[in-house]
Image (cartoon, grey):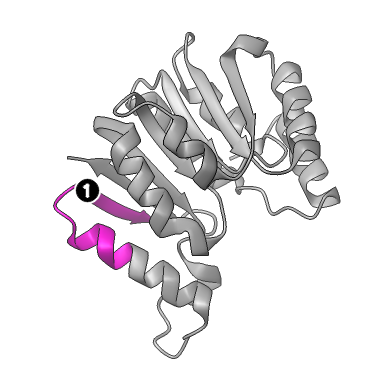
Amino acid sequence: MTEDLVLRTARSLAREVGLDAVTPGAGAALRLLAAAGNARAVVEIGTGTGVSGVWLLRGMRADGVLTTIDVEVEHQRIARRIFAEAGFAAGRTRIITGRALDVLPRLADGAYDLVFVDAEATGFAACVDAALRLLRPGGVLALNGTLAGGRIGDPAARDAETVTIRETLKAIRESEHWVPALLPVGHGLLAAVKC
């Protein structure tokens, strides 16, 4: 999947500030999920420099709004510029500065079509719980980084991040609330539809 100048710029800026943005393949999968669900309201946990946000916005309905949350004001300043350069009106994004676990409880129940989590694995379980409340039935949860750098399939890998991801994937797989699939794009993208 090739990226245009706006996405290449956002990716370059991510590297400059020490972030690992979603890969083009993962971005294309996010765009697909947003388009397939005719997404109008999307929550993104982890704004970064706007790479994933641009992919999501490009898949969303023309009247859709992306609510994106990050603790880093500087990253959000860059993302705001990237969204504008990509041609999205300011009203298409709601950029909230803060810790996701502090912000998510203030968002409306059942009001969202897609929740994308691009955050530290240690917060996955809490983000999954929040997504279950935020998503409408048929809404999609997407978790980035679920292959744990290739360690997810290695039983000898017992580091905290890998164990946390394994436990989160197992909980989603065994839950009656989700229909999941692990997509082998980028660093691993778990997509799960809320029942």
User: Disc 1 marks which amino acid?
Assistant: Trp
Query: Seen in the image, is 80 located left or right of residue 182?
Result: right
Local SS, label 1:
strand
Where is residue 170 drawn, in percent x and y? Answer: 28, 67
Residue under the point 26% across and 63% down: 171
Q: Is residue 21 magenta?
A: no
Where is residue 104 drawn, in percent x and y? Answer: 46, 38
Q: Name the quadrant containing residue 27.
A: top right
Residue under the point 60% across and 45% down: 99
Query: Seen in the image, is 4 located left or right of residue 69?
Result: right
Dot 1 crowding, Cα within 10 Å, few <14, some 14–19, many 20+: many
Looking at the image, the residue that sits furthest to the bottom is: 156
Looking at the image, the residue that sits furthest to the right is: 16
User: Disc 1 marks which residue?
Assistant: 178
Can see residue 86?
Answer: yes
Residue under the point 52% across and 73% down: 161
Q: Which residues are magenta?
A: 169-183
Q: Is residue 174 magenta?
A: yes
Residue under the point 37% across and 44% down: 130
Where is residue 11 drawn, in percent x and y? Answer: 74, 42
Looking at the image, the residue that sits furthest to the left is: 176
